[in-house]
Amino acid sequence: MASLVYGTPWLRVRSLPELAPAFLRRRQSSLFFCSRRSFAVVACSSPVSNVGSVRVRFAPSPTGNLHVGGARTALFNYLFARSKGGKFVLRIEDTDLERSTRESEAAVLQDLSWLGLDWDEGPGVSGDFGPYRQSERNALYKQYAEKLLESGHVYRCFCSSEELVMMKENAKLKQLPPVYTGKWATASDSEIEQELEKGTPFTYRFRVPKEGSLKINDLIRGEVCWNLDTLGDFVVMRSNGQPVYNFCVTVDDATMAISHVIRAEEHLPNTLRQALIYKALEFPMPQFAHVSLILAPDRSKLSKRHGATSVGQYREMGYLPQGMVNYLALLGWGDGTENEFFTLEELVEKFSIERVNKSGAIFDSTKLRWMNGQHLRALPKEKLTKLVGERWKSAGILTESEGSFVDEAVELLKDGIELVTDSDKVLLNLLSYPLHATLASPEAKSAVEDKLHEVAASLIAAYDSGEIPSALEEGQGAWQKWVKAFGKSLKRKGKSLFMPLRVLLTGKLHGPEMGTSIVLIHKAGSPGIVVPQAGFVSMEERFKILREIDWEALNKDKSVPLESTATIST
């Protein structure tokens, strides 16, 4: 946004509220307010067109890591802004001085950037409505608090902590809501001056009408209404001069010209206090949209006891930002079709706040993992190969992160990879040779009884003659030609040929495409491919193990000893 709003320099608006442009001073016909406590209040948010464009904000507190619930709120704000051609503002709510840290702020910014949710205004980005940290806006809050004091919407409260505790206890005994009794609401000027002269600490409390109700039309939840007699006069400025959350948020959203407030449903009760402040300061209210909570499988609020809950944790676990964004968008939103796969650009195109569900969304880590796999395999071939190859090298499995072996291995194994970290397991599994354990398993019984020892003898003879090494050296085509000829010599084909070959050459009953697997195992035996400590069993070592199998004992006992230096647990 330009530095001028309706021709008025924004700096002058901050320092002199009476010079604020019309959109900050205009009364809304849908909201009626009177500071006299006997009058009723009925409020309803209506569409905001104050600055001619959509402006939304995400306002995290830098007191910890970015929770997946906060990430989804940020995503919905981002998608709404982008879909409407508006602005996505990032504001740091760091008024909790004891818990807020710059380290946490940096982590939140990093997570948002990793997700691809770039902000138009906020920390590190210039904007006309800054500063964008609440800790740097205290002068603005005090200015508006004084304005409320002058207009009579707030008053000084000199109640001590002990008095407030006593009020709550008395209300509890009478089974009444624990609201402030209004002791200082009607104090005379002389009583106030007396306390000021004594230096008694005081807070600023907002005068809440004793009767009436307040209503908003939430974009997600529809009409929401509160009775004002359950609220009581609430604090907007603490005795130490620090503003209270609801006051900060209202002033910030208004002076930043936020048109739509999209946030978690746990903030819905705050709307009552904020709406009263909006009207008292003659600010137009934005439209509100309260998004449902993200729930654990047991339908309780998602927390650390359910496993990973922060964006940073999922990043470290090997998740892609594309998969994370896609899954978070589906927690409470859908485009009305069966499609579940979306890029960020497609989400911007499809998103509408009207399709956000007000019911709680269940966080399913299994589906998130599946979704990540979809995006992983959708990456361009070169990018996927580079990502997995670098993982294999950093994990200490391969000596190099690129080359023909990496290219072919990624192509063969990618369907078994949902996280980049899964690639370790599938490659180590390919390189291993747990033949003894496989032959001892009940699942191998039919293969063993199908004259597996005869196939083994013929296979060993072909290896010793040089047929197998020669065919593998020539590559996939030559290997397939040899297998076909080998099958004819044994009068075997289909499963009766391929199952024995798989068991004898890979040491397993199941796995990826057999021909490519065996050619890759042969290639892995070349110098400088596999790190010695990776537990790779070369083709030569596999045939040595085959020669030592006691087939007579195996057929008799249906088991073999599991001791083998070649058997690897993956």
Image (cartoon, rainbow, N blue to C red):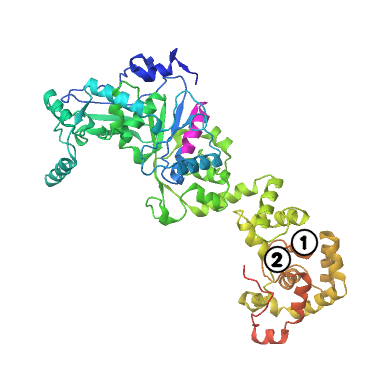
On residue 329, which mark appears?
none
Residue 451 seen in render: no
Would you say residue 228 sits in the magenta stretch? no
Residue 156 seen in render: yes
The residue drawn where x is 72% and y is 85% is: 550
Residue 240 as seen in the image, left or right of residue 173: right
Question: Magenta residues, as a range?
Answer: 74-87
The one of 337 and 471 positioned closer to us in this rendering: 471
User: Label 2 near label 1: C-beta < 8 Å?
Assistant: no
Dot in front, 1 or 2: 1
Q: Residues within 10 Å of mark 2 (few under 14, many from 20)?
A: many
306 vs 428: above or below:
above
**Residue 431 location, x and y as percent?**
70, 66
What residue is pinned by disc 1?
528
Would you say residue 76 sits in the magenta stretch? yes
**Residue 371 location, x and y as percent?**
56, 49
What residue is pinned by disc 2?
431
The one of 169 and 259 positioned closer to us in this rendering: 169
**Residue 254 location, x and y as percent?**
37, 25
**Residue 277 location, x and y as percent?**
29, 27
Magenta part mainly helix, strand or loop?
Answer: helix
Amino acid of disc 1: Gly
The one of 353 and 107 positioned closer to us in this rendering: 107
Residue 299 as seen in the image, left or right of residue 71: left
